[in-house]
Image (cartoon, rainbow, N blue to C red):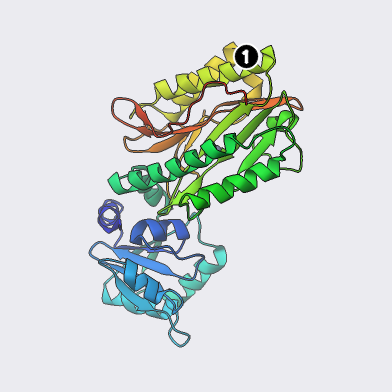
Amino acid sequence: MNHYASIAAALEAENLDGVLLTGEANRFYAAGFFTPGEDAAALVTRKDAVFFTDARYTEAASRCLEETELREVKPGKGLTDQLREVLFLKGVHRLGFEDASMSVRSFRRLEKALSEEKAPPALLPASEALLKLRQTKDAEELRRLEAAQGIAERALEDILKEIRPGVTEREIAARLQYLMLHYGASDMSFDPIVVSGPNGSLPHGVPSEKEIQSGEFVTMDFGCVYGGYCSDMTRTVAVGSVTEEMERVYKTVLAAQEAGIAAVRAGVSGKEVDAAARSVIEAAGWGECFSHSFGHGVGVEIHEAPSAASSSESPLPAGAVISAEPGIYIPGRLGVRIEDVVLVTPEGCRNLTKAPKDLTVL
Ligand code: ZN
Ligand code: ZN
């Protein structure tokens, strides 16, 4: 899998001859081959693509890359030397770079190396165009996103049998990670969040040594990577019993999530989707307790465009995958969040998360 053709079309639209991909996410998105850090680079022009990496990765890269010229970076002939040569050979005069992720130091180095040319190419920011491109998922990307989601859900099914009073948040987090790897994940999308009882009001709390007690909620927010694509889901379950208040909070969050999901459609702004969910929570009197946005895009990165926040004016494009994750957090007492990921379609959306959401008391 590579995305050279769609990048080439974007280059034309942005009036660029090529783009230099130095960050993990865009480099992987373009070439379909993952290398960590800033050691490798991919150059995509309107006609072709070159991948630069060192001897640690060249064999793996040659097995994986398609339609790509592979260049090995050697101590005597570093990345910038080879890049200058290639840019000259391919007549790249307007070069896009990753302004959102390249470090200032790397940028200055690149600028200095290129300035030694007689006619150095102009360096132009390209992160925005790349983010926009990545919003819309193709069939293969969707297949991978759904597979990642499926793995997380198998892990959830297993972990529900293990949650009982006395088990710590950290044990649950560790087991979730093991189970996702066991079912085929290559990595975690992020460190799992497992919070219980009063810790539940910390939306991004870190799993602690706290033991789960009867009468508490346990919120688990987790996801894994499969084929380079991330999943993301949250389920909140109760242990032993629930109070009337816990039940009301849970039902409100679920109703808000359903209202938000019902508002998702290509062309609708993220702001409208957020508002559909938020109004349900506000009407129930917990408006102050929904302290983050409704959703974010998911793909090669766990948080990417588009966003479904109260500040997101731009319309959601068909083919985007976004999370739907309202929550109510009552400081020092309890919290509930429910999160699915949905595919935006012209008619509405398709929920990629299949795990049940009715209030579960274990
Ligand atoms: Zn999440
Ligand atoms: Zn999320």
Left or right relative to 335: residue 103: left
Give the SS element for disc 1.
Answer: helix
- Three-letter code for the amino acid on which mark 1 is drawn: Arg
- Identity of the residue drawn at 43% across and 31% down: 354
Instruction: Please tell me which residue lies in front, 345 or 41.
Output: 345
Quadrant containing the C terminus in the rendered view: top right
Instruction: Please tell me which residue lies in front, 22 or 254.
Output: 254
Residue 277 visible somewhere in the drawing = yes
- The image shows residue 258 at horizontal and vertical percentages of 46, 21
Residue 311 visible somewhere in the drawing = no
- Taking the view exactly as shown, the residue that stands out farthest to the bottom is 76
Left or right relative to 23: residue 170: right
Residue 122, relative to residue 171: is it above or below? below
- Taking the view exactly as shown, the residue that stands out farthest to the left is 47
Instruction: Please tell me which residue lies in front, 84 or 216.
Output: 216
Residue 223, relative to residue 327: is it above or below? below
Left or right relative to 120: residue 360: right
- The image shows residue 298 at horizontal and vertical percentages of 45, 42
- Taking the view exactly as shown, the residue that stands out farthest to the front is 161
For label 1, the residue is 248
Residue 300, relative to residue 253: is it above or below? below
- The image shows residue 214 at horizontal and vertical percentages of 73, 26
- The image shows residue 35 at horizontal and vertical percentages of 45, 66
Residue 235, relative to residue 57: is it above or below? above
- Identity of the residue drawn at 29% across and 63% down: 17
Number of numbered labels in the structure image? 1
Q: Around disc 1, counting alpha carbons within 10 Å, would you say few (fewer than 14), some (14 to 19), or many (20 or more)?
A: few
- Identity of the residue drawn at 48% across and 74% down: 112
Ligand 1 picture quarter: top right
- Identity of the residue drawn at 56% across and 31% down: 235
